[in-house]
Image (cartoon, grey):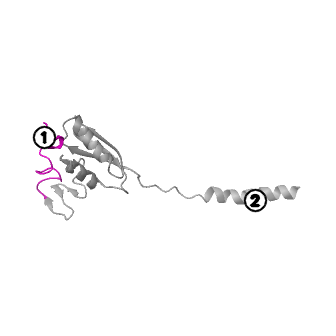
Amino acid sequence: MKTRIFAMVAAALFVLPMITFGQTETKVKPKKTEEIKIQTNLHCGDCKQKIEAELASVKGVKEAVADVDTKVVTVKFSPKKTSADVIVERIQKLGYQAKTIGGCCPGGTKSTGGCKDSGGTESKSGCKGSGAGAGSGSGQGCGGKH
């Protein structure tokens, strides 16, 4: 009987440290979703619905909320399935200006002098979508009703 108890205690003392100290550190999982804010020239509720519906059709976009007052579209998306470039391009294809807030153009690099393209060349016109052809603020994204 004493031998059996001693064997169980010895086994517990042998196994317990392996369980306790054998645990590895928890790995930090990469973000499953990212959030970007995009400045646009949307004007009304129809613009809001049009942009939100278009972005809802983009694979990987989890949520898109357009704010008419601030003209900002907040998008949560899976970086494994889509990118900020794709999201900006989809808004521009609707006829709206679109550029990310809080940095430079998607895919570009921010510098103290302004935006640089992926080749490192300084862009005098600003970020993608800020010039002519991407929506002039005339409401062309709403069909020119403004």
Q: Residue at x 17, y 51 (%)?
A: 129
Q: In the drawing, does residue 137 fall left or right of residue 71? A: left
**Residue holding disc 2:** 11
Residue 1 % position (x, y): 89, 55
Q: Magenta stretch?
A: 123-146
Position of the C terminus, as image quadrant, is: top left
Residue 144 vs 109, above or below: the answer is above
Residue 36: tell me if it is visible: no
Q: Earlier in the sequence, mark 1 or mark 2?
A: 2
Which is in the foreground here, disc 1 or disc 2?
A: 1
Instruction: Tell me the element at label 1.
Output: loop
Tell me where residue 66 appears, x and y as whole percent.
27, 40
Three-letter code, disc 1: Gly
Image position of 59 (left or right of 117): right
- Give me the residue at 23% from left, 37% from top: 46
Does 101 lie within the magenta span? Answer: no
Q: Position of residue 80 (x, y in %)?
A: 38, 57
Q: Main secondary structure of the magenta part?
A: loop
Residue carrying label 1: 144
Amino acid type, callout 2: Ala
Residue 76 appears in the figure: yes
Dot 2, crowdedness within 10 Å: few (<14), some or many (≥20)? Answer: few
Q: Is residue 135 above or below residue 17?
A: above
Residue 133, percent across and down?
Answer: 12, 51
**Displayed quadrant of residue 19:** bottom right
* Within-10-Å neighbours for mark 1: few <14, some 14–19, many 20+: few
Q: Tell whether position 124 is magenta.
A: yes
